[in-house]
Amino acid sequence: MTASFALGPVADVPLSRINPVAQLAALAVVTVVLLSSLDVVTPAVVVAAELCLLPAAGLSRPVDLLRRTWPVLVGAGSVGLVNVLLSAEAGPLTGIGLALRVVGLALPGVLLVASTDPVRLADALTVHWRVSTRFAYGALAALRLAPLLVAEFEAARLARRTRGVEARGPLARARLLGGVGFTLLVGAVRRGSRLATAMDARGFDSGVPRTNARGSTLHRRDAVFVAATVAVCAAALTLSIGLGTWDPVFVGG
Amino acid sequence: MTSTGRLPARAAPAAGPVAVAARGLGIRHPSRRAWALTGVDLAIEPGERVLLTGPSGAGKSTLLAALAGILDAEGTEVAGELTVGGRPPRAARDRLGLLAQDPDSQLVMTRAGDDVAFGLENAGLPPGLIWPRVDEALAAVGFPHGRERPTSALSGGEKQRLVLAGALARRPGLLLLDEPTAQLDPEGAALVREAVARSTAGREATVVVVDHDAAPWLPLVDRVVEVVAGGGVVEHGPGWRPVPRSAGLALPPAPDGPVLLTAARAGYTYRGAHRPALPPTDATVRGGRALAVTGRNGAGKSTLALLLAGLRRPTTGRVEAAAELAAGVRGDRREPGRWRAGELVSRIGTVFQHPEQQFLTGRLCDELALGPLRSGEGASAARATAGQLLERLGLTAYAEANPYTLSGGQQRRLSVATALATSPRVLVLDEPTFGQDAATWRELVALLAEQRARGCAVVAVTHDADLVSVLADDRLELG
């Protein structure tokens, strides 16, 4: 299948130097701030700051950016539009504010995925946040199998055609998809249990405290990164309050 | 099982190879009436390299699972005794290394070095000691890349060598290899065997290889033990050679038929891919002849099979059916890729590499009747066809069984039979003999030759040199 499905190490970009847990902490700050403000100024400032980080995540080419973010952009556009069209009070400004909010909430995730190696993420979570190694590395191993599902889906669909089974019409298509889904599930369960056996044979989750060969260190720059995120959010809120546009969700937006 | 006392959990495992001993071992899986294995007596000295062979269904896999200590703890009945290094296998798992068949379901990490380190991290080794051992293990198996190599960019043979390195880094006392080359092309398989020979030459681990295909392992093992289908094991002396699976095979002659299908400069590129999966290729498929498509992995063999089978349309060039084959197709379409599924099923039959991807129903008899029903045959005719095929394959007793419950060899025969049920003029098979034991192999070859003799065109994508030599009339080498 095509290489874009493969789960591999991500390219080393400047943002990769920020520890994944620091990125997650920053993501949490942004999420809280954006979820609680309904105006247009706050998300505008946050999105502007996030856009400045895109080159640091290796996403400076518009093509790369669009490829990763088009579902977000479509979603944001429709959220804005629907609110403007369906709500009596919502003006275009409210619509833009809501759309920016969706973009502002989604971009940190895009940045994280583009700059963070899944293994480094598992390392950071287990080392710093004491997430169970059984969960973190188990999920990592399972994630590696996901690209295979894409190839298997294709094979199962073609296999149906060879047997004379073909979907014409939406109902038949849905039934066919259900059948393919079952085939995939059976395959995934079998492969999953083979993987579990292989991990077991290498002493995974055997009760011995696990060490980490790569380690995961928090540097000064990680603290700076989180502090800068807090500062941007504070600036956004200050500006919004100063302009008199702030519209916190909990006061009754 | 023996009553060896449990060792304290944190006791450092002893180094060095371990002995394996079985006395009167019998194993019955949960909710099965028959014993999977009976009367096995076996003594393997520390550091020995032993091949366990035998036909499918004789109990090789069960014996391997028992040695690895991964039998279902609930409900599995065990008679006699089995010890690994004097301990029950389940307690000896800290001294075990395992290399299984499927290269894709044994790797955990995204980089090669991290994957080898995984087992050492699990053992609680201090990080400073891990990397030297990783490098040592990678060197021992002749891994051709550095630690940073993404595991997703490795070939099947390279993945298997990496898994082997991951097992060896833990310095196992017993290394179990479960048909480790069954899913590889011949070059990949040879490299894995070479890595096994090289990395175990120092006799630091006892090695048990399980494989029904004995011949390639003979140069690197000390002993050959055959698991016998009726129960027990037989030790083969030095100089033993397996009977070649094609020995004495007499295939019916076939009349040369007309050209049924042609590929003219047909190629295929996946959407978004930079390189074509199949560069422009010519092929001619004739009735009454068998065409073998060979070449290394990645050369586009399976893609060509999909194009000839009418499952994908070429992105360049053309695949065209002869008027004779396309007769009766709606709109007189000549390209199989444009036919409806119901039209395709009675003209071109396809057998995929993995049989279980192809099963669509819950019973063997329904599975065989499905194609005929879809091609427009009546229900009673479809049932009759299904009955005949079940009898031909010796699977009548399983008519009501679920296809997923069959053994690997039975599933393979069933998947070929489902394609034959509509009597197609062209049969396209992707690696039909993959991982099959000698008995199933002979049966498959006979079945294909029978189809050829009735005028059917057989196209087989294969790495199997024996299949090519006994069956192929024409050969197309890709890459």
Image (cartoon, coloured by chain):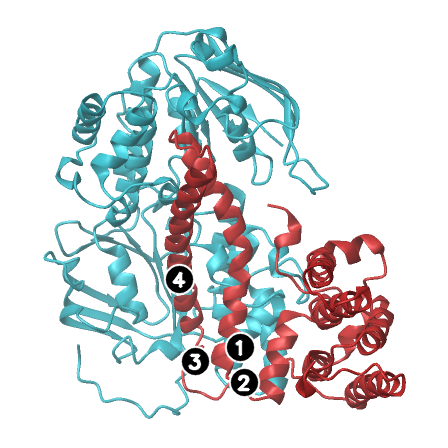
> Mark 1 belongs to which subunit?
A
Query: Are callouts 4 and 2 both on one chain?
Result: yes
| Sooner in the amino-acid sequence: mark 1 or mark 2 | 2
| Sooner in the amino-acid sequence: mark 3 or mark 4 | 4
| Sooner in the amino-acid sequence: mark 3 or mark 1 | 1
Quick one: label 2, few (<14), some, or many (20+) residues within 10 Å? some
Badge 2 element:
loop
Tell me which chain appears cyan.
Answer: B
Q: Is residue B89 left or right of residue B459?
A: left
Tell me which chain appears red.
Answer: A
Q: Which mark is residue A131?
A: 2
- Distance (Cα) linking label 3 and label 1: 11 Å
Q: Which residue position holds label 1? A: A136
Badge 1 element:
helix
Q: Which mark is residue A205?
A: 3
Q: Position of residue B258 (x, y in %)?
A: 45, 6
Q: Is residue A212 left or right of residue B354?
A: right
> Mark 3 belongs to which subunit?
A
Camera-side residue: B444 or B194?
B444
The answer to whether mark 1 and mark 2 are in CB contact below 8 A is yes
- Distance (Cα) linking label 3 and label 4: 16 Å
Q: Looking at the image, can residue B222 be seen?
A: yes
Q: Which residue position holds label 4? A: A194
Q: For residue B28, which quarter of the picture?
A: bottom left
